[in-house]
């Protein structure tokens, strides 16, 4: 049986079969981005290819899915900053994200929404559907990162961003890890300083796909587990290369949602660990916080073990067609962190110190547990609520 694989190869060697991914070429002076190939191999051929010196990582293409919002509702917000904007201190920050390029890899965007007026939207569709956002998730996330005020309501953490890279990587049927890798490389080539992803691997979907192809359930589960591990390694390899190439080209930070599979409302111990790609080394994984009577609380659905946290419950942002919507999920917390990263990137750029390692250190080092309610588990929230630079 043959499977479709993603191959990450060093830029010094020619790709051994498959299609060149977008962005294969100079990312900056003195260094190229790694090459991404997609091809079909037998297990034996894949094993042989993985041993080649030019192969940095190889993994079967696994289905990717949206980190679906837990709750979606119409919003009738009061004028002024949303609670999430206030919680991260963006409303009092002197920085706006000016001069910083952000990327959102999601379901696309409504380019005609007033929240994005004046923003240069560099778009690419990696699906076989229409270019625009037919779901609403990508528009909502983009609005939280860099949206302008809507009817007097401030929804954007970094409304000074004037260039955004929008990759539509998820359609009605989800997407694949090959599309995410290609879109990440494309976003870097477009100069993205911060890349926001609210998506994850569909492990059950991959098991189901294999069983439909006649693979026995036990073997399908085993193959899916191995593919899961290989994809985590694949994303980690990409992240390490992103960090390395930042020395020569664009300084880029990867931010991803922890996932919404936990069910603390059923049982306090019903906690699921951070899912890929967020769990991969080199990614900043994000948990979701909500408001409680005694302070911020971990959302019941938020996966545990994230690096830090952001507002993720009852988040008001843009919806396709105009107006606002309220959503909840680690998907909503992630763009808050990405927006704050843009504010820090602006400050570091002014200081001449924009480097992804410094940027990550500022994000995690300035996050706080000061506003948390009593009895919180540090493992649930990581470093705490992300905070915008104040001076």
Image (cartoon, grey):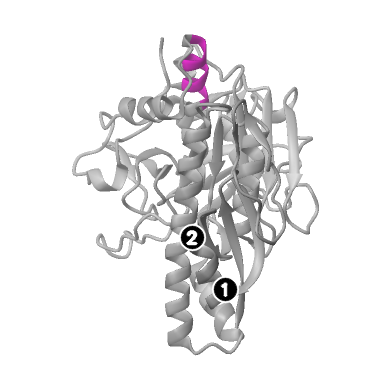
Q: Which mark is residue 45?
A: 1
Residue 281 seen by the camera: yes
Residue 128 image offset from top left, x and y in percent: 78, 59
Q: Which residues are magenta?
A: 342-350
- Secondary element under disc 2, as helix, strand or loop, is helix
Image coordinates for residue 233, horizontal then vertical, percent: 44, 56
Above or below, comparing residue 221 to residue 161 in the picture:
below
Vertical order, 271 against 74 (above or below): below
Residue at 43% across / 71% down in the picture? 226
Secondary structure mostly seen in magenta is helix
Residue 33 on the magenta span: no
Q: Could you tell me which quadrant the N terminus lies in?
A: bottom right
233 left or right of 202 in image: left
Q: Position of residue 47 (x, y in %)?
A: 50, 70
Q: Is residue 263 left or right of residue 185?
A: left
Label 1: how many Cα within 10 Å (few below 14, some 14–19, many 20+): few
Work out whether residue 195 or residue 84 is closer to the camera in this orientation and state it. 195
């Amino acid at each position: 049986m043959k499977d479709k694989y993603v191959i990450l190869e060093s830029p010094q060697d020619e790709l051994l079969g498959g299609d060149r991914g977008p962005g294969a070429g100079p990312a900056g002076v003195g260094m190229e981005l790694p090459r991404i190939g997609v091809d079909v191999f037998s297990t034996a051929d894949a094993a042989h290819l993985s041993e080649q010196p030019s192969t940095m990582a190889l993994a079967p293409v696994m289905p990717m899915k949206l980190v679906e919002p837990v709750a979606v509702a119409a919003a009738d917000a009061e004028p002024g900053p949303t609670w999430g904007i206030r919680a991260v201190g963006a409303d009092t920050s002197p920085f706006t994200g000016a001069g910083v390029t952000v990327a959102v890899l999601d379901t696309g965007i409504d380019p005609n929404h007033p929240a994005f007026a004046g923003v240069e939207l560099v778009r690419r569709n990696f699906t076989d559907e229409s270019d625009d956002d037919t779901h609403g998730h990508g528009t909502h996330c983009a609005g939280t990162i860099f949206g302008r005020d809507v009817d007097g309501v401030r929804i954007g953490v970094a409304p000074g961003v004037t260039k955004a890279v929008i990759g539509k990587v998820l359609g009605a049927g989800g997407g694949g890890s090959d599309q995410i890798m290609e879109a990440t490389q494309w976003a870097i080539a477009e100069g993205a300083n911060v890349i926001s992803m609210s998506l994850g691997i569909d492990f059950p979907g991959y098991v189901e796909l294999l069983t439909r192809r006649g693979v026995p359930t036990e073997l399908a589960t085993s193959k899916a587990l191995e593919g899961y591990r290989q994809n985590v390694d694949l994303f980690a390899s990409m992240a390490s290369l992103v960090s390395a190439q930042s020395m020569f080209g664009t300084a880029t930070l990867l931010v991803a949602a922890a996932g919404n599979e936990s069910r603390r409302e059923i049982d306090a111990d019903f906690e699921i660990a951070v899912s890929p790609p967020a769990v991969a080394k080199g990614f900043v994984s994000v948990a979701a916080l909500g408001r409680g009577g005694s302070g911020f609380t971990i959302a019941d659905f938020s996966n545990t073990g994230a690096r830090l946290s952001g507002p993720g419950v009852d988040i008001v942002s843009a919806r396709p067609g105009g107006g606002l919507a309220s959503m909840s999920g680690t998907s909503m917390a992630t763009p808050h962190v990405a927006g704050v990263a843009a504010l820090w990137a602006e400050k570091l750029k002014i200081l001449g110190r924009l480097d992804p390692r410094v940027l990550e250190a500022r994000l995690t080092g300035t996050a706080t547990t000061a506003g948390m309610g009593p009895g919180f588990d540090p493992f649930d929230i990581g470093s705490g609520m992300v905070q915008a630079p104040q001076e």
